[in-house]
Image (cartoon, rainbow, N blue to C red):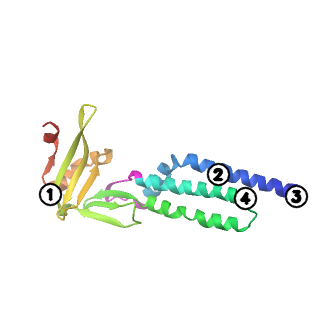
Amino acid sequence: MPNLSSNYEGSTKIILVTAIILIISSLFMPLVFVYFIQDYLYLSADKWFYDTPPSAYILFMIGMLWISVTLFLYLFLDWKFDWKGVKWISFLLMLGCIPFFMFGVSNYYYLDNKGMHFNEHTTFNTINSYYWEDMKEAKEIFVKNNGVTVVDHLNLVTKSGDVIELPYNSKVRNNRYKIMEKLQENNITLTNNMGDLYE
């Protein structure tokens, strides 16, 4: 009996430590996991770049926290009730983390010679594409930041009226000449809101 008790206490401690580690690591590990998984699955030579919106990391973080909460719940139920079915219920509950991981990893967007392609966080591997030839308007949106005027994002309007807001991050900035080239090829004039800021 002492051995059984010792083994039980040991496994309880391992589960408890694992749950705590998952909570702490969920603050930064999604950045690593999502990056490497997406890099392996989606990056290819034909893409100018692909980027990951914050929602992807948040979903992955929720998945990690889901596992942690399930482990805590298992420890509580196992302590409160002497029932073997607790393990199976906890295991089934833990499977609830899978959609968060799947939707998180499949949440990204990329640009290529054809256009812009978005896989939203609400869909799994469903890409919405907006082609360069379908654009009718492009506008750089400037904002004032600490007294300095900077580009915040690029608004692209399709012929059907859809507005695509492209954050002006380093990846977009590094590929600006390619974007401008495609806009010129399709006779799309680039405008901005600079005049509005200084009225």
Residue of label 3? 1
- Depth check, mark 1 against mark 3: the one in front is 3
**Residue at the spot of label 2:** 18
Asked whether residue 46 is drawn in magenta, I would say yes
Res. 187 image quadrant: bottom left
Check contact, mark 1 vs mark 3: CB within 8 A: no
Question: Residue 124 at what x, y percent from top left?
Answer: 41, 66
| Marking on residue 80 | 4
Q: CA distance from mark 3 to mark 4?
A: 20 Å
* Badge 2: residue crowd in 10 Å (few <14, some 14–19, many ≥20): some
Residue bounds of the magenta highlight: 41-54
Which mark sits nearer the N-terminus, 4 or 1?
A: 4
Q: Is residue 18 left or right of residue 49?
A: right
Q: Earlier in the sequence, mark 3 or mark 2?
A: 3
Q: Nearer the viewer, residue 56 or 96?
A: 96
- Amino acid at dot 2: Thr
Q: Earlier in the sequence, mark 3 or mark 4?
A: 3
User: Dots 3 and 4: beta carbons under 8 Å?
Assistant: no
Q: Residue at x 22, y 61 (%)?
A: 162
Give the CA distance from mark 2 to mark 1. Answer: 55 Å
Q: Earlier in the sequence, mark 1 or mark 3?
A: 3
Query: How many residues crowd around disc 3 within 10 Å: few (fewer than 14), some, or many (20 or more)?
Result: few
How far separated are the C-alphas under marks 3 and 2?
26 Å
